[in-house]
Image (cartoon, grey):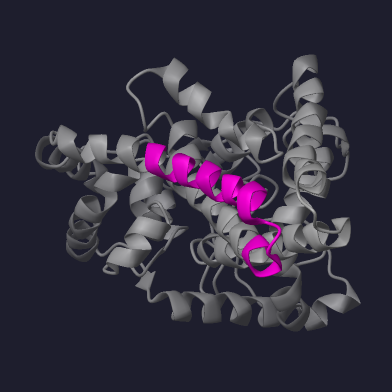
Amino acid sequence: METEKLTKLVFKKAGDDDFFKELHKEVQTNILINKNIQSRIIYKSIFLIALYFAFYGCILVWGNDIQLLFLFYILTGLTMILVFFNAFHDAVHGAVFSTRTSNEKLSCILELFGSNSFIWKKRHLLLHHPYPNMQQWDIDVKQSDVVRIFPESKWFQFHRYQHIYMWFLYFFYTLNWLLIRDFKDFFGSKDNYVKRIITIPKIEYIKLFTAKICYLFMMIGLPVLVLAQPAINIITAFLVMHFIASAFGVTALLSTHADEDAEFPMPPEDGVINTTWAMYQISKTKDFSTHNSVANFLFGGFNHHVAHHLFPAVAHTYYPYITPIIRRYAQEYRLNYRSYPLVDALRSHFALLKKNGSAENLFVTGDL
């Protein structure tokens, strides 16, 4: 039943010969000792947040020029995604500042973007991170019946064409998040695994609606009042902003878990996963473009996703130094570490969509 609580899963206990014990010790001793790397994420977060407000201010100052109106809306949207990747996401994991309070304050920037930080944290930290790609758990991967990523999800005839239409629907990712997904998490009953593990405080319902009203006023209402532009131009610029921001954002989000070689296991009936936590993380996660300095700056460590899942409480500015160590251990212990160029990662995702659009179950879910 949908109202039943999810039973917490447990991993196989790691032995003394577990690779992660040695890996963790080496990272702690040789990498995390450098506090200058930690300070970079603080400066980076402040810079990107300031840039977001600067671009938004430019909308209000120079938005009467139609070309500049669209330009600064687009730049505001792209910077919103950069703040999400590089500041908010790390803050949720307690990885920006040394105190929990400071990280929680920074994570509230998601309300500035019209969403709800409380529900995102719970969904991400309690469902996705412990059990990535786990069917019936990982709703960061399985978000809607419109796309069939999990092999055990219900198949609809329109899924035959998902490798075609998802190219277009992904442009609506942030609008879907703003206008549909949050409400589904708060009020939905179907596949609502968030509400099966937590009780949402009443104050969060107030924050949910308040954030969305304030965001829409900030991005549409205030420009309509301040600028001499017709409202239709401002609304169109707002939509274009979200289309481009979505395209940029899903580039990273699609490239880390859902590819044609990915495994999507079902929860074990006895609740015991027949592998260690670290082995599970490295086998269900992949990297992309880790040697690319531009990708390292833009994607906030999402491209070093294996390092992130193994060291979620560590700032992403450390990941370019941690990933080479993970590669070395993967080679030594014959671990299923995977890393692709970004283009190949995206191609592989759409190959998954095409295969899983079939009515037949073409995937092996794997034993746990």
Q: Nearer the viewer, residue 116 or 260?
A: 116
Image quarter of residue 71: bottom right
Main secondary structure of the magenta stretch: helix
Residue displayed at 66% across by 41% down: 113
User: For residue 238: magenta?
Assistant: no
Left or right relative to 174: residue 261: left
Q: Position of residue 56 (x, y in %)?
A: 60, 47
Left or right relative to 149: residue 92: left
Residue 34 in view in this figure: yes
Image quarter of residue 271: top right
Image quarter of residue 37: top left
Q: Position of residue 40 (x, y in %)?
A: 26, 41
Q: Position of residue 142 (x, y in %)?
A: 70, 55
Residue 192 in view in this figure: no
- Compared to residue 194, the image places residue 343 above or below, namely below
Q: Nearer the viewer, residue 333 or 114?
A: 114
Q: Which residue lies most toward the left here?
A: 30
Residue displayed at 22% across by 51% down: 322
Left or right relative to 208: residue 254: left
Q: Position of residue 221 (x, y in %)?
A: 81, 42
- Compared to residue 350, the image places residue 171 above or below, namely above
Magenta part of the protein: which range?
46-69
Residue displayed at 72% across by 34% down: 194
Residue displayed at 71% across by 24% down: 198
